[in-house]
Amino acid sequence: MKKIFFTAFILILLDQTLKIWIKTNFILGEESKIFDWFIIHFTENNGMAFGIEFGGYTGKKILTLFRIIVVGIGIKYIYDLKKTRFSHGTLIALGLIIGGAIGNIIDSSFYGIIFNESYNNVARFMPELGGYSSFLHGKVVDMFYFPIMNGHFPNWLPIWGGEHFIFFRPVFNIADAGIFSGIFIIFLFYRKEFN
């Protein structure tokens, strides 16, 4: 159990430190090129994965509450399994998933209250006039952009022939990487432990 919560804590700490630094040092849409294939690009995600939104203001509240409930159920599940012997890899993977989920929940729950907007200015922490939104209506800060391949589909290809493409297009954060890595590790190496 300690490995899970220690891993989750470290991931949350790294995730929130970087997000707060990005939010208080970049204007929305600003980017810094590290390499041609690695760009720090500040964007905010108001919805789910890949920016998918539903239901407007109420939908955002439902989504954030749903995330909190799912993480609560996940933590209870892990706590109930404390007598089960999991490998070190599984415990770390579970910690990555829980830590990543909590990292994004922090943004969705509190960033609207503690930061002002990032449009055309660098956001301030705890602004005098209040934040850009209310509790449970914050936006998730994303910053990692890896346009590894950038080109055009061959003209002979049906439907997409000649169109521009970028691989890997999604912009994500440390929390997202933790969730993906944890699920990938369990699926690839440790799924038999859950039978």
Image (cartoon, rainbow, N blue to C red):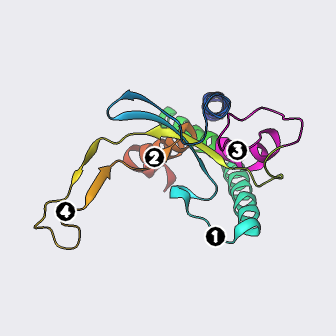
Q: Nearer the viewer, residue 161 or 185?
A: 161
Drawn side of residue 59 relative to residue 155, left or right? right
Q: CA distance from mark 4 to mark 1?
A: 32 Å
Q: Which numbered disc covers residue 186?
A: 2
- The residue indicated by pointer 3 is 107
Amino acid of disc 4: Gly
Determine crowd level at label 4: few under 14, some 14-19, many 20+ residues with C-alpha closer than 10 A: some
First in sequence: mark 4 vs mark 1: 1
First in sequence: mark 4 vs mark 2: 4
Asked if residue 186 is positioned above or below residue 26 in the image, the reply reads below
First in sequence: mark 4 vs mark 3: 3
Mark 1 lies on a secondary structure that is loop
Q: Are marks 4 and 1 in contact (CB under 8 Å)?
A: no
First in sequence: mark 1 vs mark 2: 1
First in sequence: mark 3 vs mark 1: 1
Q: Nearer the viewer, residue 51 or 33?
A: 33
- The residue indicated by pointer 4 is 162
Residue at figure coordinates x 51%, y 32% from the top left: 88
- The residue indicated by pointer 1 is 54
- Mark 4 or 3: in front is 4
